Amino acid sequence: MVNIILQIAGGIMLLSIILSMYRFFKAESLVDRVIAFDVMTIISISLIALIAHFTGRTIYIDVAIIYGLLSFLGIIIIARYLEKSL
C-alpha cells in the first residue's frame, strides 16, 4: 500500500517538474525563472529521496542533502546578484 502511494507521489512530482519547466521557459522576468528553477531543484531532491527509498540505497540521501545545500547557495548568490549587492 505504501509503495503504491509513493509511486503516485512520484508521478505527481514528475508532472510538477514538467509544469515548472514550462514556467521556466515561458517566464517573462528573471525572478520568475529563478523561482521556477528553485522549484525544480526542490522537486528533484524529493525524487532522489524517493529513488533512495525504492532502491534501498542510503547513499542517495547524502547526494540529495548535498544537492540541496548547493541549490540553496546558488539561489542565495543569484538573489544577491539580482539585488546588485554582489
Image: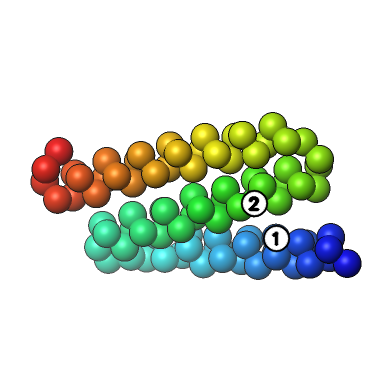
Q: Tell me if 7 is positioned left or right of 1 in this view.
A: left
Q: How many labels does the image show?
A: 2
Q: Which colour scheme is used?
A: rainbow
Q: In the picture, residue 57 is in which quadrant? A: top right
Q: Is residue 63 above or below residue 52?
A: above
Upstream in sequence: badge 1 or badge 2: 1
Q: Residue furthest left?
A: 84
Q: Tell me if 52 is positioned left or right of 15 in this view.
A: right
Relative image position of residue 81 (x, y in whole percent): 19, 44
Residue 47: which disc?
Answer: 2
Of residues 82 and 29, which is closer to you in this image?
Answer: 82
Q: Please, what is the three-letter code of the amino acid marked with disc 1?
A: Gly
Relative image position of residue 39 (x, y in whole percent): 46, 58
Residue located beneath label 1 in the image:
10
Residues at marks 1 and 2, CA–CA distance in whole angstroms: 7 Å
Of residues 61 and 30, which is closer to you in this image?
Answer: 61
Q: Residue at x 65, y 45 (%)?
A: 48
Give neighbour class at mark 2: few <14, some 14-19, many 20+ (Cα, 10 Å): some
Relative image position of residue 54 (x, y in whole percent): 80, 48
Quarter occupied by the N terminus: bottom right
Q: In this view, does 49 lie above or below 43?
A: above
Residue 37: which disc?
Answer: none
Give neighbour class at mark 1: few <14, some 14-19, many 20+ (Cα, 10 Å): some
Q: Please, what is the three-letter code of the amino acid marked with disc 2?
A: Leu
Q: Residue at x 70, y 65 (%)?
A: 9
Q: Residue at x 33, y 46 (%)?
A: 75
Circles 1 and 2: CB atoms closer than 8 Å: yes
Of residues 18 and 68, which is closer to you in this image?
Answer: 68
Quarter occupied by the C terminus: top left
